[in-house]
Amino acid sequence: MSSANEAAKMFYRTLGNTGLITSVFGFGFWATFGVKAGLLDREGIEQAKQIISVAREGGINLFDNAETYGNPVGEAERIFGQAYKELSTENPELWRRSEVIITTKLFWGGSGQNERGLSRKHIMEGMANSLKRLQMDYVDLIYCHRPDALTPTETIVRAMTDLVRSGKAMAWGTSEWSAQQITEAFWIARMEGLEPPQVEQPQYHMFHRERFEKEYFPLYRAPYNIATTTWSPLASGLLTGKYNDGIPEGSRVTQKGYEWLQSIITDWKEQGKLDKVKELSEYAEKNLGCTMAQLALAWCVKNENASCVLLGATKVEQIEDNLKAIPVAAKLTDTHMEEIEKILGNKPDNFWGHGNRKVLASL
Amino acid sequence: MSSANEAAKMFYRTLGNTGLITSVFGFGFWATFGVKAGLLDREGIEQAKQIISVAREGGINLFDNAETYGNPVGEAERIFGQAYKELSTENPELWRRSEVIITTKLFWGGSGQNERGLSRKHIMEGMANSLKRLQMDYVDLIYCHRPDALTPTETIVRAMTDLVRSGKAMAWGTSEWSAQQITEAFWIARMEGLEPPQVEQPQYHMFHRERFEKEYFPLYRAPYNIATTTWSPLASGLLTGKYNDGIPEGSRVTQKGYEWLQSIITDWKEQGKLDKVKELSEYAEKNLGCTMAQLALAWCVKNENASCVLLGATKVEQIEDNLKAIPVAAKLTDTHMEEIEKILGNKPDNFWGHGNRKVLASL
Amino acid sequence: MSSANEAAKMFYRTLGNTGLITSVFGFGFWATFGVKAGLLDREGIEQAKQIISVAREGGINLFDNAETYGNPVGEAERIFGQAYKELSTENPELWRRSEVIITTKLFWGGSGQNERGLSRKHIMEGMANSLKRLQMDYVDLIYCHRPDALTPTETIVRAMTDLVRSGKAMAWGTSEWSAQQITEAFWIARMEGLEPPQVEQPQYHMFHRERFEKEYFPLYRAPYNIATTTWSPLASGLLTGKYNDGIPEGSRVTQKGYEWLQSIITDWKEQGKLDKVKELSEYAEKNLGCTMAQLALAWCVKNENASCVLLGATKVEQIEDNLKAIPVAAKLTDTHMEEIEKILGNKPDNFWGHGNRKVLASL
Amino acid sequence: MSSANEAAKMFYRTLGNTGLITSVFGFGFWATFGVKAGLLDREGIEQAKQIISVAREGGINLFDNAETYGNPVGEAERIFGQAYKELSTENPELWRRSEVIITTKLFWGGSGQNERGLSRKHIMEGMANSLKRLQMDYVDLIYCHRPDALTPTETIVRAMTDLVRSGKAMAWGTSEWSAQQITEAFWIARMEGLEPPQVEQPQYHMFHRERFEKEYFPLYRAPYNIATTTWSPLASGLLTGKYNDGIPEGSRVTQKGYEWLQSIITDWKEQGKLDKVKELSEYAEKNLGCTMAQLALAWCVKNENASCVLLGATKVEQIEDNLKAIPVAAKLTDTHMEEIEKILGNKPDNFWGHGNRKVLASL
């Protein structure tokens, strides 16, 4: 029922300096595939094919992975690799390799001391392993999944450059690096004639804005033009509104292994954030006729510095529901945004420069 | 009664890459001179001579100024310039220009739009005016007093470089720039063959640590080796303990013009910080036999990344009292520091790198 | 009986700028394998498997080779390559390629004029031959086994860079180059956008310290951060104490081919070094409850600039005995080190900078 | 009786990359002027004029000073400055500023912590003070008198570059820096578009050869082409032969303040060096008809890497005597040099490269 043409309902953006065009929503494999023990391998692959097909038909062209996703490590890449291989045979037009942006991230490749981090050894070995699992010759973006205190930036930039220059990736980026670290990597690349980082993958949602909006602010401009692929737009579900009244009885959150999420919910409650989510839910319904989740996603997309907002659905219905945030985003006016800002009350100060120095009056 | 030899009671540190050796305490002219309206000029100069003599005899060799200090603007530089001139005639050995480090800062040179900020025009005009007021041919360090959103970093680095190369300053630095901004300035200098920034002047005290200890952390290492001259070690007096029980009746804080300080005191009270100051005051007396102020100063000095901690006394007794923090610092053990940390409870996380990646065991 | 977890008894260090983590002891194949004429090939491989298994189980993760080791040339690589292949099949978890650091060195590849040295021709041909013998696609570190007076540094740096960039090695280093030569190679790489040397393999033991502690001193810091893998920690056995009373009757040292060792023993005797070894042996037994060899090894490891100290055992008992130096190193206090220094009496002067210039007093 | 023409009896050499031509002997002011307390100022200046006139008439065109020479500090520069001023009026042809090479060195400018070392502050202040004492606008060579552990090389190179570019010196050099330090300075200058060091001033005589002949060896070639102005060719008088039989009764060496020299004499005696001096003295007389001192000087001059050998006479007769080493140098054959080498027995190994790698046979 869908085609590449209909995908125009999606919005697209340029991905920084890469010349690539990305859908404003991407699909991420964090906590989506390869995590359920006991799921038959074939069943897992079929499920993955189904969900990413819905995403692709909805206009999504960016698919985000990491060597560490899945259980055991590498499982998410393996499942996606096999799913993609089958889909591109079954529907070669929709799944043209030349039209989709496939990414992965390196940092945690195993339990050993030299199997993690950003040594050249791990970058080279990790990339080779990822490509083998993905059954591909290259990815489009390769990320350093975290900063590594034990490897100097220059060593990392040299290795990432060689991935690009040997054709294993089209560009490289970072995830959760500080603005200082990205700036340093950029200039070392400039000094040494190496490939600069092109994209950062940070957490970004209504209650996690400081780094994205303030710390990274100078990086969105020349000479950096850093693109972003943001994660956790729904704050692990808290921005769907389903925990507005605390943790529902029998929710999986009450189970073992979800203590971290319970503690976040408790914190948000104490900090008054859940009240704000409630207020925003009502605002969404009343003024935009949408769900809280759709508003939260649309709000991210409205920030033009978010090149691509990563969704992470495990069910077809979720991804379908999330995609409805696109028309919501199209509908959001400056007035809506100001009213939402008033409810949130957490807009970061613009730190760049100093208040006393401004153009007094300009047209 | 004192001499350069006796100054060995002071501690000294190298000032980053400059090759200069600075006393761990410096003397700052912020809110010290030229601020009392109505004070006869001669009286102000004599008072300045008296106080900075006590500082110099105590081993202090760094004297910090800014074009904006004093009222009207420039008054602090004018008073210090005249005081220094007289002192170096009266006591030429103690006040040798080759042994003291004299600094000033540029940003606010007047009320006009082009009299502030970091345009080349203001940097050149401001420097010329400062040197005239100081009656000197050069200063040792010249700072950009704040970042300027309206002037690109490269323009600033070019102008500061020319101050250094024309002999008007021995090195240049920044004040309250972000780590990203300093990193950018450093690499632009490196790329373009210009002079890199050598020193940052940030606020730093027990309750204002995040930027100094976390954000700037990578800058203290190669290739940056940024030195620091830190300000407000006593948090505008809150770390003396004198507001532990709120604002005393009849205090000058209750007067007009001090609303900002009142509001800080109120905030600290609400945030439980004043209780912690009270607890620390008792700790200081009981375990170290010193005052709260001395502990607060010694605590700053214990951080080896604080090259020089700026004191800002207006009375001889204050500076004498502050200097007694030196033996306190010498006495502070790791155990003391840990106990103080426990009271403070605000140690910033080390953000550099990622926890999952570390050397398993090392000697 | 052992596992990667138990390996935590070993100590680990970062290997300079590479981002790799090395065990503080490594295993070197100099004079260990492939040297005994007449040893059946299978026997040699089995012996090698046995010894390096003990090393690996003891936490050692660095294995050092050279194209010239063994007799005929290349034999040590061939034996290790086959041993590693078999071990990684028999115990794939312990011998994961991604966790171990495998190195080799190029200089003497044959008897011809163009089969040795550091011409691009020999570097390329030598590397190919080494990898074939090792049955591997890449090594982790590739060294220039000596400086080569006949090949300009730039030619060498270009060839080594191409080994790294073509994926045949993760980083390159030098062995027994002067500090001046390493510095030159580093800056030529920087100027020309090539790969800088990352590691040096020098001789280092209690009576051969000058170059390691003094000449190389500036290289351990930024911008170089040169790592080291040191050889001959036991001075060809002299630091085991077994020649304390001269050469024992019937010792292999009295045989032909060992004249060089005889002459060293004679020199050490004349120079009073054997007396010092005797004194140190007693010190080790009395104060640390360890053998002379263990003290000599622990002493090397205590120097944090020794990233990895290479052991060279030919018997299982030797490597087991050597590994006991790890708890000795953990036990060595500053006082022990000073007492040992007093016996040695050969601590190199710190040449860096000039004594008259120092910070008078610092915390 | 002499003129610039007759000066052709002197030998001349190019001074590295500077394009300057230096006499193979220079005149140094270390321990020559301004050191005798009680000497009337006028008397000191007259004496200086007399001695340097003999040197100049003998063809010497390089005059070496340092800010620290003399007592108090600066006295040697002050005396030379005044002497030169008077001489260039009295004999303007001989003392043309355009024909002589005047040098000085910075490191020890006073007793304060910031009055020594190689901070930009001291380099700038020291240079200004030196030029004032010399009564000159510029010197031809300015040296860093020692390495400074507290100032990074880049900071030093930047400041020295600015001395050259502002016209205060024609080139800059180092004194007693290690080959590694000079190499680093050279490449930092190359990287950053700064002025590289051009000349090194090391100690060099028959019994202090290792650094000059071996460590510095690679620096005499491209791309460095470091020139040298060597000091102490007579080893504080030991190579005159006057201590061959120990310290003569009543010699000034027995006086207080000369303990350092006594201890050297004792060492040389114990090490058999005085015997070798005796042997060389006889060789000189028998084979060359010259004194030991003349042979020692001629021997230095024969090394073409010694661009200029500094003499340090305090009496007219001494300088006249020393100049007679020129015809001795002209007479020294390869056979002489080999015979002398045999007596000395301390020729440093050529360390550059490794013995096993050489061209087997070449025409």
Image (spheres, coloured by chain):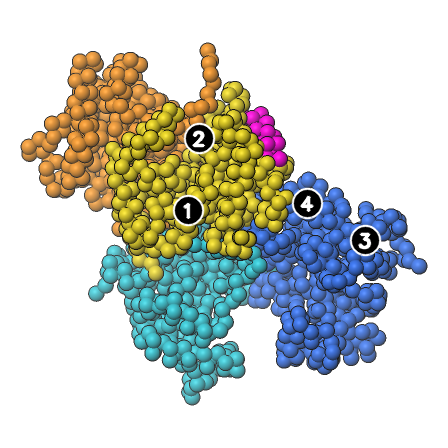
Chain colours: A orange, B yellow, C cyan, D blue
Pinpoint residue A63: horizontal percent, then vertical percent.
28, 31
Q: Do the residues labelled 2 and 1 touch (CB within 8 Å)?
A: no
The reply to whether discs 4 and 3 touch (Cβ–Cβ < 8 Å) is: no
- Residue at 66% across, 60% down: D202
Tell me the tag on residue D83. Answer: 3
Q: Nearer the viewer, mark 2 or mark 1?
A: 1
Q: Distance between the residues labelled 4 and 1?
A: 39 Å
The residue tagged 4 is D128
- Residue reaching furthest left? A249
Distance (Cα) linking label 4 and label 3: 19 Å
Residues drawn in magenta: B119-135
Residue at image position (18%, 34%) is A267
Residue A2 figure quarter: top left
Question: Are the residues flagged by discs 2 and 1 from a single subunit?
Answer: no
Q: Which of marks 2 and 4 is in front?
A: 4
Which is nearer the eye, B116 or A2? B116
The amino acid pointed to by label 2 is: Tyr
Residues tagged by mark 2 and mark 3 found on one chain of the structure = no
Badge 4 and badge 3 both on one subunit: yes
Is residue D349 shown left or right of residue C84?
right
- Locate residue A75 relative to residue D345 in the image: left or right: left
